[in-house]
Every structure is written in structure tokens, then in C-alpha cells.
Image (cartoon, rainbow, N blue to C red):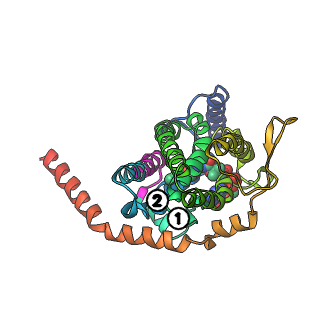
């Protein structure tokens, strides 16, 4: 071994020990700190997928903007969909602090090279779906994202704090919408139940595959990127949703769902994991439509990006002059 290699190895060990010490005291890793390449890559993967989900997630609900039943509902929905765009932007910024480029991430999304959440590949067939997405999809998102406020990477954790505050408004508006429909006509109550039946299983899939089939969980937990496993969060979500469903007056389409006093949790059935795998592979009911729509919006927005870049260049040259 040459002297330089030995010295390099020593430095690498010291850096790694420093990184481990930060994780051990549950402190944050910041962009300029040393980090293992695998940690950086895992974060770029998760944060980018998360950002893409927020952006693609605007589409199912955006579908109902022009057909909202009242001005009040339209204003609420518009605010929510705009919030999702903001969440995407916070998250793309967090990914940029890891050396990723926003243009490259967008390219990877529209070419299908990077994933986004399976849930947004299901259609929204009635206005009740706006309420169900708020209640169950944003509810699942809150379950998953509140622990991410304590993730080990600083910019991601700080973005999550803002996002979670807005998600809790999203969940409430959904629950309130469903509550209003449940106080309405029998047809409206039926519409809510039908919507809940369609979204329950896809909502459970949002937490990812079961722990024993999740290739990333163990390492992501060791690095403090994830704070809970997929199954732990899924259980938490079921326990949280059951009393809310009872209050609302709807049921979940799961004959195995029941309280287990011994465990202090609800037992529940498994989603169709083959359907999940197909949706993640791009074969869900709306995958092609979601990506085509995003690709078109990106192409049609080219002039905005060019104008903004030209403006930035002109401002920079004025400052230099
Ligand atoms: N959909 O080893 P695993 C929102 C992939 S936005 C698609 O367990 P990990 C909202 C996974 O990527 C909701 N793919 O992975 C927005 C991995 O594939 P790769 C988005 C999934 O990362 C607008 C493979 O399966 N939330 O709520 O340890 C309106 C194996 O999985 C899914 C986030 O992104 C899925 N559901 O754990 C309303 C939260 N699940 O990459 C609402 C942040 C798994 O190895 N992300 N895969 O090829 C996370 O917490 C974690 O990434 C996950 C997965 C729990 C999702």
C-alpha cells in the first residue's frame, strides 16, 4: 500500500466516523457535510420520487377543477392543487442540494426512468373522489411524512415540516367534504361509499411493499432516512382510519378488518401486491395518461423556461456592468 492510499483511507475512516456520530445523536446531515455515496443516491431517489408524486398528484384532482359543485369547493380544491405544486418545488430544491439537477430529474420523470407514487395512477370518477383523496390519500401521506420531518438529511426534513402542515389542511378538507355528502341524499352517501371502496386498497399500497419484500428499508432505517418501516406505517394508518370511517358512516372493503385486543391494533387483509407491482411497472389504469399529460405540459412550458433564463442572464449582465 502506498503512503497516499493509506492516508486517503485514514481520512475516509475519519469522515465516516463523523457521519456515523451525527446519525447516532439523531442530528442532521447538511449539504456540505461528507456523506457516503450510497446515502446520497438513496436520498436523491426517494426525494425525487416524492417530488414527482406531488407534481403528478395534481392531475387526478385537477380533473375536477372545472366541475366543482360550488365556488367554495372550487376555491378549496384550487388551493389544494396549488399546494401540491409548491410541495414538488420544495422537494426538487432539496434534491438539488444533493447535486441533482431539476432539468435532469424532470427528464427522468417524463421518460419513465424514475417512479412516482402508485396511487396517482388510479382515475377520479366522481366528486366524492376529491374528498376520499383528501381523507385517505393525504391521510396516508401524513402518516408517512410526519416521521420524515425527523429524517437525517436536513433540507428534506425541513421541507417535510412545511409540507405536513399543509397536508393536514388537505386531509381535513377531504373529510369535511365527505361528511357533508354523507349528510346529503342516499345517492350522495352511495357515491362516498363507492369512492372509498375504490381507494382503500390503493391507499394501503402507498406505504410500499411488505417489509420482508422491501429492498431499501433496512439500509434507509440504518441511515435515519426512514424512521419507520412500511408495515409499521401501514398499521398506524389502518388504526387511525377505522374510527374516522365509523364516524363518517362508511365501511372499508376488507372482510378481515377487525380489532385485535391482544395486539392493541386492527388486523387487516393484504392488498393485491401483483396489482401494485403492475402499477409500479407502468401498467396501471392511468400511467400512460399521467405521463403524457406531464410531458405535454413540459413541452408547452418551454417558452416560459427560456424567457426566465434570458431574463436571469440579462439581470446578471446588468449587475456585472
Ligand atoms: N409507488 O424498498 P421500498 C402525496 C418502490 S405524495 C411507487 O420499500 P423505499 C400526495 C420503491 O421506490 C406521496 N413505487 O422503497 C401528493 C422501490 O423502487 P426503487 C409520495 C413504490 O423507498 C399529492 C421499490 O418500490 N410520498 O402524498 O424504502 C396529493 C421497493 O420499495 C411505492 C412519498 O414519496 C409506491 N407506493 O420505501 C396528495 C414519501 N412504494 O426506487 C398526496 C417518501 C414503493 O428501488 N417516500 N415503491 O426502484 C417514502 O417514504 C418511501 O420512498 C416509500 C418506499 C415508503 C414510498
The vertical placement of 84 against 127, above or below, is: above
Compare residues 236 and 124 and report the one nearer the observer.
124
95 magenta-colored = yes
Main SS category, magenta section:
helix
The vertical placement of 293 against 176, above or below, is: below
36 with respect to 93 (left or right): right
In percent of width and height, residue 273 lies at: 75, 63
Residue 66 occupies quadrant: bottom left
Residue designated by label 1:
124
In terms of secondary structure, where does tag 1 sit?
loop
36 with respect to 269 (left or right): left
303 with respect to 38 (left or right): left
Span shown in magenta: 84-102
Q: Is the residue marked by circle 2 packed among few (<14), some (14-19), or many (20+) residues within 10 Å?
A: many
Residue 20 occupies quadrant: top right
Residue designated by label 2:
61
229 magenta-colored = no
In percent of width and height, residue 64 lies at: 43, 62
The vertical placement of 299 against 228, above or below, is: below
Compare residues 285 and 113 and report the one nearer the observer.
285
Q: Is the residue marked by circle 1 packed among few (<14), some (14-19), or many (20+) residues within 10 Å?
A: many
In percent of width and height, residue 85 lies at: 41, 52
Compare residues 32 and 312 and report the one nearer the observer.
312
Q: Which mark is residue 147?
A: none
In percent of width and height, residue 51 lies at: 49, 53
In terms of secondary structure, where does tag 2 sit?
helix
Q: Is mark 2 within 8 Å of ligand 1?
A: yes
- Tell whether label 2 touches label 1 (CB within 8 Å): yes
Amino acid at each position: 500500500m502506498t503512503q497516499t492510499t493509506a492516508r486517503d483511507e485514514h481520512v475516509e475512516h475519519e469522515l465516516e466516523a463523523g457521519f456515523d456520530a451525527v446519525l447516532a445523536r439523531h442530528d442532521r446531515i447538511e449539504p456540505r457535510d461528507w456523506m457516503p455515496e450510497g446515502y446520497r443516491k438513496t436520498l436523491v431517489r426517494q426525494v425525487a420520487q416524492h417530488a414527482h408524486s406531488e407534481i403528478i398528484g395534481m392531475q387526478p384532482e385537477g380533473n375536477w377543477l372545472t366541475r366543482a359543485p360550488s365556488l367554495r369547493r372550487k376555491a378549496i380544491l384550487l388551493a389544494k392543487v396549488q399546494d401540491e405544486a409548491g410541495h414538488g418545488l420544495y422537494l426538487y430544491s432539496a434534491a438539488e442540494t444533493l447535486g441533482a439537477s431539476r432539468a435532469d430529474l424532470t427528464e427522468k420523470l417524463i421518460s419513465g426512468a424514475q417512479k412516482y407514487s402508485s396511487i396517482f395512477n388510479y382515475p377520479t370518477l366522481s366528486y366524492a373522489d376529491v374528498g376520499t383523496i383528501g381523507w385517505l390519500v393525504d391521510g396516508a401521506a401524513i402518516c408517512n411524512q410526519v416521521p420524515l420531518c425527523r429524517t437525517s438529511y436536513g433540507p428534506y426534513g425541513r421541507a417535510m415540516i412545511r409540507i405536513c402542515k399543509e397536508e393536514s389542511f388537505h386531509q381535513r378538507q377531504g373529510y369535511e367534504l365527505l361528511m357533508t355528502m354523507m349528510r346529503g341524499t342516499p345517492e350522495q352517501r352511495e357515491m362516498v361509499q363507492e369512492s372509498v371502496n375504490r381507494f382503500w386498497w390503493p391507499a394501503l399500497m402507498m406505504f410500499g411493499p411488505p417489509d420482508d419484500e422491501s429492498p431499501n428499508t433496512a439500509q434507509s432505517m440504518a441511515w435515519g432516512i426512514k424512521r419507520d418501516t412500511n408495515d409499521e406505517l401501514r398499521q398506524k394508518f389502518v388504526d387511525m382510519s377505522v374510527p374516522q370511517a365509523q364516524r363518517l358512516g362508511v365501511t372499508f372493503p376488507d372482510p378481515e378488518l377487525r380489532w385485535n385486543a391482544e395486539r392493541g391494533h386492527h388486523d387487516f387483509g393484504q392488498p393485491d401486491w401483483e396489482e401494485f407491482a403492475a402499477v409500479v411497472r407502468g401498467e396501471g389504469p392511468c400511467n400512460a395518461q399521467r405521463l403524457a399529460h406531464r410531458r405535454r405540459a413540459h413541452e408547452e412550458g418551454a417558452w416560459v423556461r427560456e424567457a426566465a433564463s434570458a431574463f436571469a442572464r440579462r439581470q446578471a449582465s446588468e449587475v456585472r456592468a
